[in-house]
Image (spheres, rainbow, N blue to C red):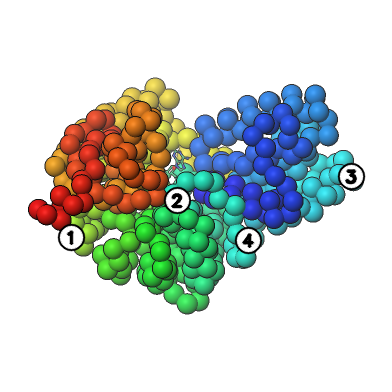
């Protein structure tokens, strides 16, 4: 979400004569785009602002802005104790950015706009994308699910979807600009709903755009994962065989207190349905440990669900209390050491499952999209299978953006190792 918002802001600025600089000490304007989802993300912003303050002491004309989800929370703090911050803009107010820069030059007072909108989807603003093979396309903003641990409905406001037409136009432009992969992005992508159709219609329309080699999307909510979406995924070759499906917790009581609207049985059934519709699908998840009141027995059920599903990978988090959310008001928060202990257990188990799933790939031929040079050596590429596994392989005359057949030879940690298949040999076989 954050990368997409930064690219949007970058688009706004570069269309109006501003240029990016690699050297922060030379910048006339410094913006920090913030995320409030976990405490850790907030801490990082505070330390960054300390650095920007020092830069401004040396170069007092530098304009400093705080943008995005934390703007709302930080507003009072900035007014009271961060006079060096000139501009504070919430995630629905980026259109005001240029006006604010201009009036800031005249006024020299702190300028703020953190109003949330029911309608803003930045329909006609094209982002300026970072280099790479993947283009993020934001399809909706906000969230109405109100999971009790989550700050997003408060910082990003109500759910609203962009039109299919403008998303398809952006996808066409991404192809023209040379991107091989498109990732459709939203807090809750599968509750996408616009006048001309829901998420399955959108997926179908984007998949039909000429030249789109791969389509991914993130993140869906288990509650809205319909058979229609699975059917569209299996119909189109270019929609990746991969779903990120956040579990959060494996105990029904905890899920209820989280307001996740499904039970562990629903979740397991859904995974079965997905695997029936999309054989060889990659499934990843998000897991939170140490939600307020989570007992040891309840926590064990998260491990049980993991053992049943055997996710390909998982993003794991210790519960972090977010001011303003319902769960922050619960009075049975767990000790940090308990959360840490549970996190380590989840990470350990997931490591085993990732290895188990990855080993199934050995000797398979996988189509891999070449994405970047491997950290391992300049002779190797790193790319992903359509099920979202990283593969490291010898470059042998291929280029970034190509999709190449690779025989998987071994597994190391979370990555696969392989060799490019000689196409002539493949055809002869
Ligand atoms: N504490 C810990 N993890 C959280 N997430 C969201 N809010 C919190 C929180 N308060 C995690 C969820 C979500 C992912 C994007 O971040 O797992 O799916
Ligand atoms: Fe947050 Fe839940 Fe919405 Fe995801 S679905 S953004 S976790 S409120």
Quarter of the rendering containing residue 277: bottom left
Q: Secondary structure at mark 3?
A: helix
Question: From this viewpoint, is residue 247 visible?
Answer: no
Instruction: Look at mark 4 in the image and give the residue it sits on.
Output: 125
Instruction: Look at mark 3 in the image and give the residue it sits on.
Output: 107
Instruction: Look at mark 1 in the image and give the residue it sits on.
Output: 276
The residue lying furthest to the bottom in this view is: 196
Image side of residue 314 versus residue 124, left or right: left
Image coordinates of residue 414 in percent, x first then y, are 28, 34
Image side of residue 360 versus residue 136, left or right: left
Separation of disc 2 and disc 3 at Cα? 40 Å
Among the two numbered marks 1 and 3 on one chain, the one whose residue lies closer to the N terminus: 3
- Is 23 placed above or below 181 here? above
Is 36 or 13 nearer to us in this picture? 13
| Front of the two marks 2 and 4 | 2
| Front of the two marks 2 and 3 | 2
Separation of disc 2 and disc 1 at Cα? 28 Å
Among the two numbered marks 2 and 4 on one chain, the one whose residue lies closer to the N terminus: 4
- Is 136 placed above or below 163 here? above
Classed neighbour count for the residue bearing mark 1: other residues with Cα under 10 Å, few (<14), some (14–19), many (≥20): few
Q: Secondary structure at mark 1?
A: helix
Separation of disc 1 and disc 3 at Cα? 62 Å
The residue lying furthest to the right in this view is: 106
| Front of the two marks 1 and 4 | 4
Instruction: Look at mark 2 in the image and give the residue it sits on.
Output: 134
Q: Residue at x 43, y 25 (%)?
A: 336
| Front of the two marks 2 and 1 | 2
């Amino acid at each position: 979400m954050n990368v997409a918002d930064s690219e949007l802001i970058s688009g706004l600025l570069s269309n109006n004569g501003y240029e990016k600089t690699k050297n922060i000490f030379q910048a006339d304007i410094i913006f920090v785009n913030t995320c409030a989802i976990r405490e850790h993300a907030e801490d990082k912003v505070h330390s960054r602002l300390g650095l920007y303050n020092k830069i401004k002491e040396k170069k007092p004309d530098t304009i400093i802005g705080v943008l995005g989800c934390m703007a709302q929370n930080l507003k009072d703090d900035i007014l009271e104790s961060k006079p060096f911050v000139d501009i504070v803009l919430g995630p629905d107010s980026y259109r005001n950015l240029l006006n604010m820069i201009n009036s800031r030059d005249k006024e020299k007072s702190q300028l703020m706009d953190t109003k949330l909108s029911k309608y803003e989807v930045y329909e006609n603003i094209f982002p300026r994308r970072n280099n790479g093979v993947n283009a993020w396309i934001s399809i909706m903003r906000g969230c109405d699910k109100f999971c009790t641990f989550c700050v997003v409905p408060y910082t990003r406001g109500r759910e609203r979807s962009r039109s299919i037409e403008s998303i398809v136009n952006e996808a066409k432009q991404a192809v023209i600009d040379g991107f091989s992969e498109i990732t459709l992005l939203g807090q809750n992508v599968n509750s996408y709903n616009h006048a001309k159709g829901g998420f399955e219609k959108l997926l179908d329309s984007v998949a039909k755009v000429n030249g789109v080699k791969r389509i991914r999307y993130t993140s869906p909510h288990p509650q809205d994962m319909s058979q229609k979406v699975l059917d569209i995924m299996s119909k189109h070759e270019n929609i990746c065989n991969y779903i990120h499906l956040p579990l959060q917790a494996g105990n029904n009581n905890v899920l209820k207190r989280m307001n996740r609207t499904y039970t562990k049985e629903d979740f397991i059934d859904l995974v079965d349905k997905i695997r029936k519709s999309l054989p060889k699908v990659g499934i990843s998840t998000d897991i939170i440990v140490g939600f307020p009141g989570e007992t040891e027995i309840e926590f064990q059920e998260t491990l049980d669900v993991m053992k049943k599903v055997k996710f390909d990978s998982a993003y794991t988090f210790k519960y972090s209390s977010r001011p303003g959310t319902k769960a922050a008001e619960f009075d049975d928060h767990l000790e940090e050491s308990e959360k840490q202990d549970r996190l380590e257990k989840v990470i350990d188990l997931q490591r085993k499952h990732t290895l188990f799933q990855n080993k199934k790939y050995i000797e398979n031929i996988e189509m891999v999209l070449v994405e970047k040079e491997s950290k391992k050596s300049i002779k190797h590429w790193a790319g992903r299978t359509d099920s979202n596994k990283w593969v490291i392989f010898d470059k042998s005359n291929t280029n970034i953006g190509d999709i190449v057949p690779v025989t998987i030879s071994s597994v190391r940690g979370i990555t696969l190792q392989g060799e490019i298949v000689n196409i002539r040999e493949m055809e002869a076989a």
